[in-house]
Image (cartoon, rainbow, N blue to C red):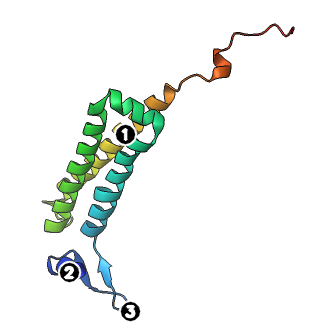
Amino acid sequence: MLCVWLWHVGLYDRPSRESGTPYVTNPTRRWVGQGFLLTLMVSMAARLLPVYSADVLKRRRLLEVTLDLLLIGVLVRVSAEAIGGYTPLTGPLVALGGSLGVVGFAVFAVGMWSALGRLPRTAAANRPPTSGVR
């Protein structure tokens, strides 16, 4: 039923393979890959990775800005691709959506990098140096 609806609204092209299976178009791949999977990975990293999770708890805006940029980017890009593809009118919108997605992932990467740069010191590093005599 879902495939029929997606074909009806134009997210699937006609079957172009010998097997008769539909060819998934760019907007479909975009909202599944960039809109769902990438957003899911970034949001779950904020919950599951201990050091990054603690950092996000302190700076909630970091996660909010990251996810907002990713979701707005995919919304702009998928809408532009679904409306007109890469025509002169919608081409800049596709580029804007892709750029917002890249900036959103860069914000995530910088946040992850800075969180990993502040790792707690190990117990061995906290011990005072010994003189070697016991």
Position of residue 31 relative to residue 105, above or below, is below
Return the residue at label 2: 7
Q: Nearer the viewer, residue 77 or 58?
A: 58
Helix, strand or loop for disc 2: helix
Marked residue nearer the N-terminal end (2 or 1):
2
Q: Check contact, mark 3 vs mark 1: CB within 8 A.
A: no
Residue 29, percent from left and from top: 31, 67
Marked residue nearer the N-terminal end (3 or 2):
2
Circle on res. 14: none
What's the residue type where badge 3 is placed?
A: Glu
Quarter-wise, where is residue 16 in the image?
Answer: bottom left
Image point (22%, 57%), residue name: 77
Q: Is residue 10 left or right of residue 53?
A: left
Q: Please rate how many residues cluster around mark 1, counting C-alpha atoms within 10 Å: few if below 14, some from 14 to 19, many from 20.
A: many
Between the C-alphas of marks 3 and 2, the distance is 18 Å
Return the residue at label 3: 18
Circle on res. 108: 1
Image point (62%, 24%), residue name: 122
Q: Looking at the rendering, in which quadrant would you find the N terminus?
A: bottom left
Residue 65, percent from left and from top: 25, 38
